[in-house]
Structure formats: structure tokens, C-alpha cells
Image (spheres, rainbow, N blue to C red):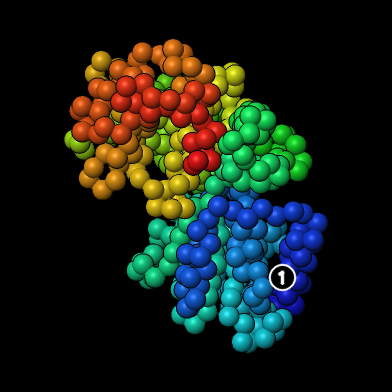
Amino acid sequence: MDIEGIKRIITDQRDEIDHLYKSRRLIERDLPGDKLAKSLEHPNILAVLGVRRCGKSVCSHMLLKGKEYGYINFDDERLYGMDAAYLNLVLQAFYELYGTDIEYFMLDEIQNVPGWELFANRLRRTKKVVLTGSNAKLLSGELATHLTGRYLDVTLYPFSFSEFLKFKEIEPDIHSTKSIAGIKNALREYMDVGGFPEVYLFGKEMAARIYEDIIYKDIISRHDIRNRRSFSEIAKYLVSNFSGEFSFRKLCGASSIRNVHTVKDYVEYLESSYIILVLERFSFKLKEQIMAPRKVYCIDTGIINTIALRSSQDLGRLMENLVAVELHRRKSYYGGDDVFYWKDHQQREVDFVLKRGEMVSELIQVSYASAEEDIKEREFKGLLRAAGELGCGNMKVITWDYEGEAGEVKCVPLWKWLLDI
């Protein structure tokens, strides 16, 4: 690969981005934009991570809007096989195209280039660098060792419900019955199609394509998994078991793989690619926390409705999945609480335990209920038992359509909680 070939690729990719800005209505993401922009006031690295096709590139371009910057996307077949030895040619190409005074660089899906870390570390000493990547381990290797905290990272998620309403051009008005009805109809649509922007543009079949790209490009190919069928079975099992418990031994029984360590690796690959979220059971005893079954959630309900083997009409479990993703989103964007679930030996359960520092800050149940009497007694029993054991009186049930108080427990509709109203 020569310098002129790299320059053509950079120019072609920039033309594609310019066309995107002109042809589509882009949605401002619910990110702390001032905080991200401040991270680039001085030579530094901002890493925007997240699941494939969630909007990392567009978000990063919008952050750099109005600035002169060099951009290259390494998720391009013309760059397949590139390694770190060619990255200095990429830098030279930027300088020839934009001049040597250019301050900003955006390196998209940089994890596709083996050995990229030292190049990025050298570049950020004098430049302001935005990296994007579809793997949670992007900053866990060589780069993290050299940077020693001199970077900021944020995990971007598919559209939140708030962002979905922006896309649909729905302005919430909690004082209007008509508006609330429209919001709830939009919530049902959001639960059905999910939050990947391309699904809104090209149809629900895009969710299946995104899922396949994650499984085959981001995991099987990258980790050179030979037993593709067994890995695919485990991935589909976990997505189908959304909002449910699993153990590594149980996964062995559900697949043809008998090695628990291999199954652990496979789950880690899925989690690192952001296709699933895994919650540990809360316990003040570390050994109990490690040994207990975990709960799994899918990054997007649109993928669940396209891929899952179980019925997607289980609205209570879909609601719980939405809440799990939103809690993780809030933690990533605004530094929210750590998230666990809770269960005792009598099988009383709380869907979400939020922990702030050493203290449990909130207990949350999710129930597909439209009235207080629809909330099952076990939901309250689990909350009250956990409240006593964990020393937390802040209890909430997220419902479909009921708002009020049931003793010490506050009930709030899902749409209202998602919009943080």
C-alpha cells in the first residue's frame, strides 16, 4: 500500500461523511458534550466505544464539527491486513491532504490494526485524537499501560428512548393526555424495533444483519474461533434468555462444548463486543457474588425480537431488558451507580440493586402492570426483604402504566422513568 492509495481512501471516506451530513437528519446524542469537548482542549485521547453500528462515528464527527480534522475508518476492506507499520504513512497522508498544522485526528475502528497502541500514544503527545472501537478491551492493553489515565473513554449505546423520540420528532408533554398516549405508542414501537439508527432507515431486517456482523466480524473472525456453530448456539441462547439467569455450566449443557473455560471465554467475547450485558448477583461476600449465577441482557430489544428463540411478546422481560440497558447507559454517560441483581435462598428477587461506593442506593423492580393490584405480591416481598438485608429504603417499581405509592414503594411508569421526568 502506497501513500497515494491511502490518500484516495481518506478522500473517499470523507466524501461519504459529507454526503451523510447532507442527506440525513442527524440526532444529537444525550451525551455530556461539554465534558467530551473539554477532554480535547489539550493534546489527549478521547475513546468512543460501543456496539457496532450504534452511531459512534457520527457522534464523533458531530463532536468535531467546525474543526479541521483528519479522518480514516479502518473498517474498510481496502485497509484489510494493515498493521502498525503503515500508520505513519496514514499520518503523512493526512499532512499532505490537510497541512502539517492540523490538530485533530479521528481514527475509526482502530482495533482492526494490530499494534496501533504505540502510534496513538505518540500522536496524542502533540495532537488531539478521537478513537472509536467496537470492543470493550480496546484500552486494556498496551495503550492503557502507556497512557496511565491520560485519556477519557465513553461507551455509546444505541438510541435511548429520548433520542428515539427526537428522531420521530415527538415532543413529550406530560400535561397532555394526547401527548402521553403518543409517547406510550412510541414506546411500544421502540421496544419492537430497538435503538439502532440504521433500523429506522432500512427496516427491521437490519437488526439481524447487525447481529450477524457482530458475531462473525467482531468475534469469530477476530478471535479465530474454529467451532463457529457452537459459539453461535451459545450467543443465540444468551440473547434468547434475555432478562434471565445463566451459569457457565448450564451453558455447557445447552451446547456441544464441555470445557467451562471455553464457555467463559465465549461469554467474555460477547460481553466485550457489547452485544450482551451481564449482571452479577449482589452480595457483601465476594465469594458468594462470584459463585452465584449471573443475569444476561441484550444490548437492544430490536435484536431480541429478530433473533431470540423465545416469544418476544413477554413484555415484562422486554421492559426489564430496557431498564438494564438504560441503567448501564446512565452509568457510562453520567457516572451512575454500579448495577447488580439480588436473590435470597427463598428465591425472593430484586431485578436491580444500585450501589454507590459502599452503599446500596436504590432497589428497582420491573413489572408489566397498569394498576397497583396488577403488581404481584412477590415484587413487594422481594423489595422489602432486600431493603432490610441491604439497608436501603429507596425502593421503586417501574410499571407499564401505574404511578403512585404502595406503602414505602414508589411506582413510576416506564416511559416516565426512561425520560427521567
Q: Nearer the viewer, residue 182 or 225?
A: 182
Looking at the picture, how far across and down is residue 365, in whole percent?
39, 26
Lateral position of residue 184 relative to residue 199, left or right: left
Looking at the picture, how far across and down is residue 408, in whole percent?
30, 25
Residue drawn at 63 percent across, 29 percent down? 177
- The residue carrying pointer 1 sits among few (fewer than 14), some (14 to 19) or many (20 or more) residues within 10 Å by Cα, namely many
Residue drawn at 52 percent across, 68 percent down? 37
One can see residue 213 in this view: no
206 shown above or below 157: above
Instruction: Provide the secondary structure element on which disc 1 rests.
Output: helix
Q: Name the residue under label 1.
A: 10
374 shown above or below 131: above
Lateral position of residue 149 relative to residue 89, left or right: left
Count the marks.
Answer: 1
Q: Which of 96 and 154 is in front in this view?
A: 154
One can see residue 360 in this view: yes
256 shown above or below 48: above
Looking at the picture, how far across and down is residue 252, in whole percent?
41, 25
State which quadrant residue 106 falls in.
bottom right
Q: Nearer the viewer, residue 160 or 286?
A: 160
> In the image as oriented, which residue stretches furthest toward the bottom?
100
Residue drawn at 75 percent across, 71 percent down? 11
Three-letter residue code for mark 1 = Ile
Lateral position of residue 154 relative to residue 358, left or right: right
Looking at the picture, how far across and down is residue 330, in whole percent?
45, 47
Q: In which quarter of the image is the N terminus?
A: bottom right
Residue drawn at 58 percent across, 76 percent down? 104
State which quadrant residue 204 falls in.
top right
